[in-house]
Amino acid sequence: MSYVVTIEPTGEEIEVEEGQTILDAALRQGVWLPFACGHGTCATCKCQLLEGDVDIGDASPFALMDMERDEGKILACCAKPESDLVIEADVDVDDDFAGHPVEDFRGTVVAIEDLSPTIKGIRFQLDRAMAFQAGQYINLTIPGIEGSRAFSIANPPSKAAELELHVRLVPGGAATSWIHETMQVGDELKVAGPYGQFFVRKSDDKDVIFIAGGSGLSSPQSMLLDMLEQGDTRQIYLFQGARNVSELYNRELLQQLAEQYDNFHYIPALNAPADGDDWQGFTGFVHDAAKAHFDGKFEGHKAYLCGPPPMIDAAITTFMQGRLFERDIHMERFYTKADGAEDQPRSALFKRI
């Protein structure tokens, strides 16, 4: 059995199978709804139920309070229709968003590489090509671990039958521990994607600033490789932050690209160089490297941030002080089930952040 869900104010209709969430059905039919965590903790996918009956599912009481439930609010990532529905969602799709439907794939591990002491590069061969936009991510199902885990795609869309992932070992993390300690070449895993609203706004001709920290290099790498392949003529700046040289992975690749393309500029920054690093570059945090490079003036640029939340927060503050605001700052933020909605602060100045 399936149900028809009408999404206002666009009037789009999707078909939802019994037991399927509204969000999953929408993404698999190429219809975008706002979301972040995907499992009921962040409230990004909150909608208003206008008509019909629904099972609200396992929504966090912090993300969907009792008063909101009484008012007919639901979370699209948890809610499962029990009849045909009409819902109202805060749909604000960017014109540059391609809207590729989410699909299921089989990925075979073809290479595992130590990128740094804490980050592994994993390459998958997919059973068929995946259409995606540079900057998006996939959900990976890990054997023996409940649910799935999100990882950004590091390769450009031109390599549509391949996936390159950069996976940082999270202390105590079951999924990343399995990838670092157990995964072998030849393993087959379930892959679903693409997901996310982190992509280059190609219709905007402003020069681009990427800020990347840790394994957060993956999305910017995909995005800048795609821009360079497509002959984008904007000035592109990548600021990569790490603690020391051993953690500054793919440095040689990025330096080669900077030598090959006149419009690409690579600025690495180390905040705690080791004694033997013989570091001659910028010493300090990556947002400070950007501030120094642009003399604290960022107006007229587009910024894309990917990395640890403290890095992102510091970069946002730096950009705001330099006259760059919400419409020109984009990022991808992942939530885990351990993250309660009450622990996710929202900026009073930024609707999306």
Image (tube, helix red, strand yellow):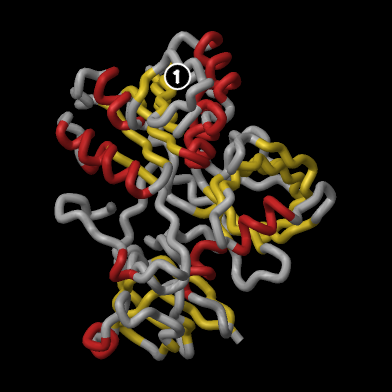
Quadrant of the rendered image containing residue 295: top left
Instruction: Please state the horizontal and vertical placement of residue 305, each as a whole percent of the image.
Output: 37, 39
- Compare residues 184 and 85 and report the one nearer the observer: 184
Dot 1 falls on a residue whose secondary structure is strand
Instruction: Please state the horizontal and vertical placement of residue 79, each as a whole percent of the image.
Output: 44, 80
Mark 1 lies on residue: 266
Where 16 falls versus 120 (above or below)? Answer: below
Q: Report if residue 149 is visible in the image.
A: yes
Residue at 79% from the left image edge and 56% from the top image edge:
188
Residue at 47% from the left image edge and 52% from the top image edge:
196
- Compare residues 240 and 202 and report the one nearer the observer: 240
Residue at 51% from the left image edge and 46% from the top image edge:
136
Task: Please identify the quadrant where the N terminus is shown.
Answer: bottom right
Residue sitting farthest toward the right = 186
Where 192 falls versus 72 (above or below)? Answer: above
Q: Report if residue 127 is visible in the image.
A: no
Where 35 falls versus 259 (above or below)? Answer: below
The amino acid on which the numbered mark 1 sits, given as a three-letter code, is Tyr
Instruction: Please state the horizontal and vertical placement of residue 156, each as a whole percent of the image.
Output: 59, 34
- Crowding near the residue tagged with mark 1, few <14, some 14–19, many ≥20 C-alpha atoms within 10 Å: some
Residue sitting farthest toward the front = 275
Q: From the viewer's perspective, tell me whether residue 181 is left or right of residue 332.
A: right
Q: How many marks?
A: 1
- Compare residues 100 and 284 and report the one nearer the observer: 284
- Compare residues 98 and 106 and report the one nearer the observer: 106
